[in-house]
Amino acid sequence: MWAILVLVSDRRRPIVAKTAGLSPDERNARMVDVFIRIDSRAAYPHVLDVVQSWGPDLVLFEESENAAPLAAEATGVPAVCVGITARAVGEQFRPQIASAIGDLRADLGLAPDPELERFQTMPFFTLAPPSLEDPGTPGPADALRFRETDGDTPRPLPDWWTDDSRPLVYLTFGSVAPTMNYFPGVYRDAIDALGELPVRVLVTVGRDRDPRELGPLAPNVHAARWVPQADVMPHAAAMVCHGGFGTVRAGLAAGVPMAVVPLFADQHYNARRVAELGAGIELEADADGLADAVRRLLTEPSYREAARRVADETRRLPTVDTATAILRRLAQAA
């Protein structure tokens, strides 16, 4: 398995290197080759072996992983797709995806499916409320939408700021960006911009980095590797984030307006949708304008009102634990 991982990494590297300097759309189109022609091709025989040896009643897979549904099809096992981003993102690259999957299907001896009908007709689960979808590409009409389960009562945050009652701004760029060359530069620029404001700032840098790498921090800034977002959101007046779909969902589900600094992948599309909803402000991939954007989030009520509308919509969805019974019925009906 280690040899396979090294081989995949070696094949990935030149493609990823060539995406530097490309627009987000161009970069993501190139990454189709990585996810399907390299990753899925390498994963398929191993996923197929698991399905054949284990004999599951159903295969649950996330939408960017294509080895699992192909293995399920090859063995006659029903499959359910779990969305991990807005549906419009994948639809935008449907020609490239269809071509790459078509070549893979041919090599694996599976029947042609040039329009991706098999993928489009299988059950689709998502944690995205309808408003986060692009109105022009809302996804399957029969998509099953859920929300996270209600957890324990959020815990109070430690008093890192010593009785400071100024608004709390939560700064996070997710768990992947800290492992890339965005750290610490993008973080440092954002911290410096926010340090000028009359706010408290909580920065999380991920488990792989040491907050001390950020250098000296202003008294109103506290940095940590990780703090449960469920504990932070009830206290946050605004969020600064990278636009990762999970982070955007978590913030809007709590009614927190956000300034979005997209870095890669689907984040530019998510940032645009947040701005279209009026629940936040889309920025370029740097800290220019960040201080002004956060100031507007805190002083103009329309942003929080829009975020709360998404939160209200999210609360009306069934909790994700109800999906278990649906999966059981789908498996039994196959």
Image (cartoon, rainbow, N blue to C red):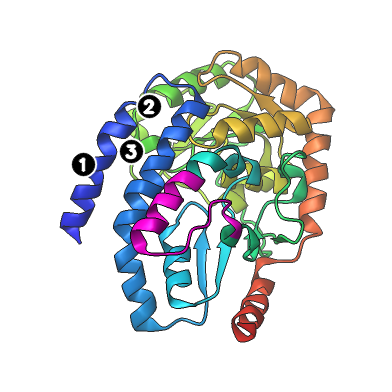
Give the mark, 3 or 1, whose residue is nearer the N terminus: 1
From the image, tell me which residue sits under label 2: 19
Give the mark, 2 or 3, whose residue is nearer the N terminus: 2
Magenta range is 98-117
Which corner quadrant of the image does residue 224 belong to? Answer: top left
Front-most of 293 and 226? 293
Element type where label 3 sits in the image: loop
x, y percent for residue 181: 34, 28
Report, in whole angstroms, how far the alpha carbon at label 2 lies from the one at label 3. Answer: 28 Å
Question: Is 110 one of the magenta-colored residues?
Answer: yes
x, y percent for residue 26: 47, 27
From the image, tell me which residue sits under label 1: 10
Front-most of 241 and 244? 244
Residue depicted at 54% across the width and 17% down the height = 193
Element type where label 2 sits in the image: loop
Residue depicted at 66% across the width and 23% down the height = 294
x, y percent for residue 121: 65, 62
x, y percent for residue 83: 59, 54
Give the mark, 1 or 2, whose residue is nearer the N terminus: 1
From the image, tell me which residue sits under label 3: 210
Amino acid type, residue under disc 2 in the picture: Thr
Amino acid type, residue under disc 3 in the picture: Asp
Residue depicted at 55% across the width and 38% down the height = 93
Q: In this view, does 3 lie to the left or right of 229?
A: left
* Quadrant housing the C terminus: bottom right
Total marks placed: 3
Question: Is 66 one of the magenta-colored residues?
Answer: no
- For the stretch drawn in magenta, what is the main secondary structure? helix
* Quadrant housing the N terminus: bottom left
